[in-house]
Amino acid sequence: MHRREFMEGTRGTMAVDWEERIDVRRLREGRNERALSRLRETELGSMLLLSDPNIRYVTGLAMTGGSGADHYTLLTEAGRITHWDTADHASNQRHNCPWLDDVRYACPGLGNVPRAAGRDSAREFLLGTMADTVVDALEEHGLDGEPMGIDVGNAGLLEAFEERGVDCRPAECSAVMEDARKVKTREEIECLRQVAAICEAGFQRIKASARPGKRESEVWGDAVRELHRHGAFVGGGYLTSGPNTWPKHQANTTDRVIRPGDLVYADFYNVGYLGYCSCYYRTFSIGEPTDAQRDAYETARDTLYDVLEGIEPGATTDEICEGFPDMGGEHAEYYDAEEHWQLTTNHWAHGLGLQLYEVPLIWRGLSPEHPVEIEEGMTMAVETQEPADRQGVRVEEMVVVREDGVELLSQWPVEEITRIDH
């Protein structure tokens, strides 16, 4: 395990003049430089980005979803950015985002707007107008005739560009952005460290709030309130208890009343800080855990740390995934499963960044036949689970790959189940 140096760790979330914290300008510029560097290694003259995380990676704009293609960004090989957005957003960006000097009004050619239009002619107008806005920009930048990457493979949009003589290359664009984003900059890593700390504030609120007689939804509400208090974006997560902890409950948090002897499982996934997403599990016991619960937790924890020991630069995901359980350890008979790919999300590690799932993925269901090499600066979440009688435990750590192994970004105690006395 990598050990942090003196004074390394989470600092405050406010802006101050007496200490360097997360440098948001350097965050934006570092990401943009990585994407631009990868773009210049290809034959592409530009890339059209419609995926929210890709747009944020290149522009720094807080993309939080929309009605579908009502915002899109063009990055040229010369480093110029043209961004299209809805009327209110675009006018706001022109005023508040001085690093962007070319913000235009978008035409929503994909998603909910054309779906609600009611007529094919209206949909054709929207899609064609969207394509025209991009073609006009390509001509202004002197890139007409040059191949353009695009990060979505929508058949209608590709056809609209083809009709206008644009050589669209989705695969090349996806490869550029995947390669740029898989290794994180210093600021990106600090964002993930910060969101881990915010999740720990949520765990502490659960520890203070959970007790017999409270509903799962009440305890989860208390936790979410704490996350919001720290300025987090809460785009997912849930809390379950008792028999809802194994298997994962399809409705996630319910109105079930917590009882003595329950396990309580909290899953902070898609909690965001400056767009960077968490995936961080912990298990609590209401009162003294049973021997079965302790044993299950020990198995899940040891499996997790066995996998962590194998993660280092140069290792490959096919090697590392062997640390996860075989089909017996996966309790495949419970699921009536025969292949690892049927057990999605049970035991694996996945990249973290502006999306919940990024490169790399370490999983017995995929990695043996499709290995990926681990690189220094990759960030990921590693998760394990184990049944305990009619309940279950789960544990997960957020890590960054350093030259000498992994550094834990998560810090909530992991040696034992967190006990909640009542």
Image (spheres, grey):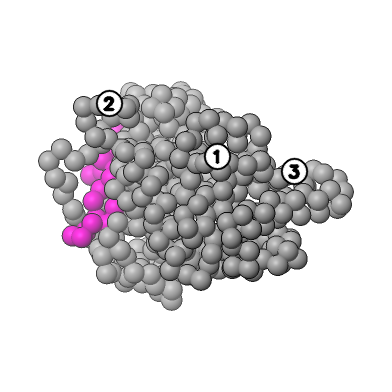
The answer to whether residue 295 is seen in the rendering is no
- Seen at 71% across and 45% down, the residue is 107
Q: Earlier in the sequence, mark 3 or mark 1?
A: 1
Q: Are marks 3 and 1 in contact (CB under 8 Å)?
A: no
Q: Residues within 10 Å of mark 3 (few under 14, many from 20)?
A: some
The amino acid marked with disc number 2 is Val
Q: Earlier in the sequence, mark 2 or mark 1?
A: 2
Extent of the magenta region? 400-419
Residue at the limit of the structure toward the left, as seen here: 6
Q: What is the distance, in whole Å, between disc 2 and disc 1 at their CAs? A: 27 Å
Q: Is residue 159 above or below residue 271?
A: below
Query: Circle 3 sits on which residue?
Result: 113
Near-viewer residue (394 or 177):
177
Query: Circle 2 sits on which residue?
Result: 16
Q: What is the distance, in whole Å, between disc 3 and disc 1 at their CAs? A: 17 Å
Query: Circle 1 sits on which residue?
Result: 64
- Seen at 62% across and 42% down, the residue is 104
The disc label shown at residue 194, or none: none
Near-viewer residue (276 or 54):
54
The amino acid marked with disc number 1 is Thr
